[in-house]
Image (cartoon, rainbow, N blue to C red):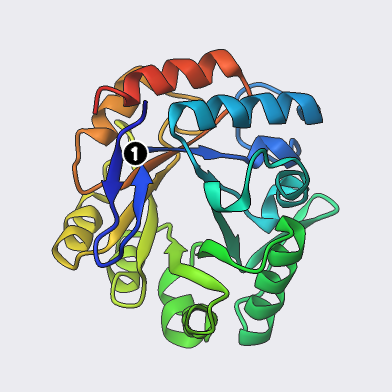
Amino acid sequence: MINRRHLPGTDIDLPCLALGTVKFGRNEAVKYPNKFDLPSDREIVELLEQCQRAGIDLLDTAPAYGVSEERIGKLLPGRRQDWLLGTKAGEAFVNGQSSFDFSAEGIQLSVEQSLKNFQTDYLDMVLIHSDGNDLKIIEETDALDTLNKMKNAGKIRLAGMSTKTKDGGLAAIKYCDIVMLTLNLMDRSQLAVIEAAKDAKRGVLVKKAFNSGHASPSDNLRFILSHQAVTSAVVGTIDPRHMQENIAIASMF
């Protein structure tokens, strides 16, 4: 079973390994080394059941992940309250192209659509999906303020940001319950953000743990989870064998 780590400042514990679901709904304009077909409904259900048996209840997705949200909403096994559903707002992916909208209206509409896609009345986590201009989003838009208002209204339990820069991550900590950042053996540029989040009692999600499939899963997952300030490593896969290998490694932490 996967161990859980407490999310500072909340009454929520997250599994130290979470499932990223970009491959549930999108296989074009992605950075993975090998092409892949989208999994069948049955394959998704079996993978989710595998995660559930291991204690992995946190799913990470986004509107930019194609039809991932809709498929999860339709196929999620068990009860809604048995899962932690995390998505993003700010980026959409339509007709092979990404577009960004960090306005208050755009963020609110995105969250409302995600609620419909998941067939639920609340989301456990919503992150601003940065286009790389982290500081501009934080300082010049109402994106994070809108998420926090929706949190106060009970539609979101946790508000945060998926950042792309060290300065952005450091700035986001002031406004977020949790930050998502890149960390692997080839990219340690965000370590200062992890330490700052620890000091500020904020949660940390790690993305690109395996450098989009270009790095060793075993070595990188051990490296990431050895940092106790990391709340959860988000790993995307649609291969049950790979999932089991990741579970075996994460179970040691």
Answer yes or no: is residue 130 visible: no
Callout 1: 10 Å neighbours few (<14), some, many (20+)?
many
In the foreground, 55 or 213: 55
At 31% from the left and 41% from the top, the residue drawn is 4
Answer yes or no: is residue 125 visible: yes
Q: Which amino acid, by three-letter code, is at mark 1?
A: Cys
In percent of width and height, residue 180 lies at 40, 55
Q: Which residue is mark 1?
A: 16
Does dot 1 land on a helix, a strand or a loop?
Answer: loop
Residue 185, by quadrant, is top left
Q: Is residue 155 above or below residue 42?
A: below
At 70% from the left and 30% from the top, the residue drawn is 45
In the foreground, 123 or 225: 123
In the foreground, 151 or 226: 151
Q: Is residue 201 left or right of residue 174?
A: left
Q: Is residue 40 left or right of residue 118?
A: right
Residue 26, by quadrant, is top right
Residue 236, by quadrant, is top right
In percent of width and height, residue 9 lies at 25, 67
Query: Outermost residue toward the left?
Result: 199
Quarter of the figure that contains the C terminus: top left
In percent of width and height, residue 110 lies at 69, 71
Q: How many marks?
A: 1
